[in-house]
Image (cartoon, rainbow, N blue to C red):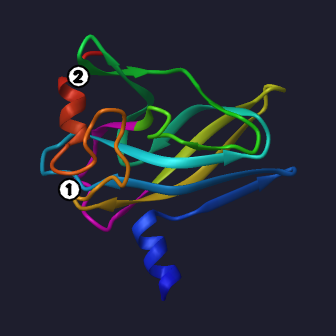
């Protein structure tokens, strides 16, 4: 029972193996969206046994999915699309702690609390080969704590990343 509760609260851990290259996606989550909200962010911790770069994300629930960084610049938090996120060999990369997130835009439907959205990551290795890793991210309540602050942003209370995305400078 304790494992079930842990899995529900902290996301589903996915391990993909191909040719000895293991990739783990853990602690994935998103927030439920408000009616009419057209964007959402997803957080996760990704570990690749071989050095790789995260170069893409797709989600059937969104028209567009991008890799984003967040930087505090000129007194404002700004989001920027990035081409790749480095995944050093054997190191867990916590996207939020590293200042990144997966951005879903043009949502096709509302994401409701408890719903699990299916995503696919694309990783590229030094030899140029790519690999796709599928995982699910459960939706937390709109007012749920992220667990950790992202840079200078508070982790609790009404921070709607989708709405924030619409108002941030790119």
**10 Å neighbourhood of mark 1: few (<14), some, or many (≥20)?**
some
Tell me the magenta residue range. Answer: 103-117
In percent of the image, x 33 and y 65: which residue is there?
Answer: 115
33 inside magenta stretch: no
Tell me the residue that label 1 is attached to.
Answer: 142
- In the picture, measured across the screen, residue 65 lies left or right of residue 89, that is left
Q: Position of residue 165 (x, y in %)?
A: 25, 30
Kind of element beneath mark 2: loop
Q: Quarter-wise, where is residue 121 in the image?
A: top right
- In the picture, measured across the screen, residue 48 lies left or right of residue 10, that is right
- In the picture, measured across the screen, residue 103 lies left or right of residue 129, that is left
Q: Position of residue 169 (x, y in %)?
A: 25, 16
**10 Å neighbourhood of mark 2: few (<14), some, or many (≥20)?**
some
In the picture as drawn, the residue positioned furthest to the right comes out as: 19
Q: Position of residue 14 (x, y in %)?
A: 61, 61
Q: In this view of the protein, which residue sits in the foreground, 12 or 90?
A: 90
Tell me the residue that label 2 is attached to.
Answer: 168
107 inside magenta stretch: yes
Q: Quadrant of the C terminus?
A: top left
Q: Position of residue 30 (x, y in %)?
A: 35, 52
């Amino acid at each position: 029972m304790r494992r079930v509760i842990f899995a529900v609260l902290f996301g589903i851990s996915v391990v993909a193996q191909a040719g000895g290259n293991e990739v783990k996606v853990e602690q994935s989550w998103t927030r439920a969206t408000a009616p009419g909200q057209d964007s959402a962010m997803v957080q996760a911790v990704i570990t690749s046994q071989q050095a790789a770069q995260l170069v893409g994300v797709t989600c059937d629930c969104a028209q567009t999915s991008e890799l984003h960084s967040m930087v505090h610049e000129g007194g404002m938090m700004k989001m920027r699309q990035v081409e790749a996120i480095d995944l050093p060999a054997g190191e867990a990369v916590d996207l939020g702690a590293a200042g990144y997130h997966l951005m879903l835009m043009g949502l096709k439907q509302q994401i409701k609390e408890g719903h699990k959205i299916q995503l696919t990551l694309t990783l590229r290795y030094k030899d140029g080969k790519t690999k796709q890793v599928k995982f699910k991210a459960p939706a937390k309540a709109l007012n749920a704590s992220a667990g950790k602050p992202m840079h200078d942003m508070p982790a609790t209370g009404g921070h709607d990343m989708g709405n924030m995305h619409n108002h941030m400078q790119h």
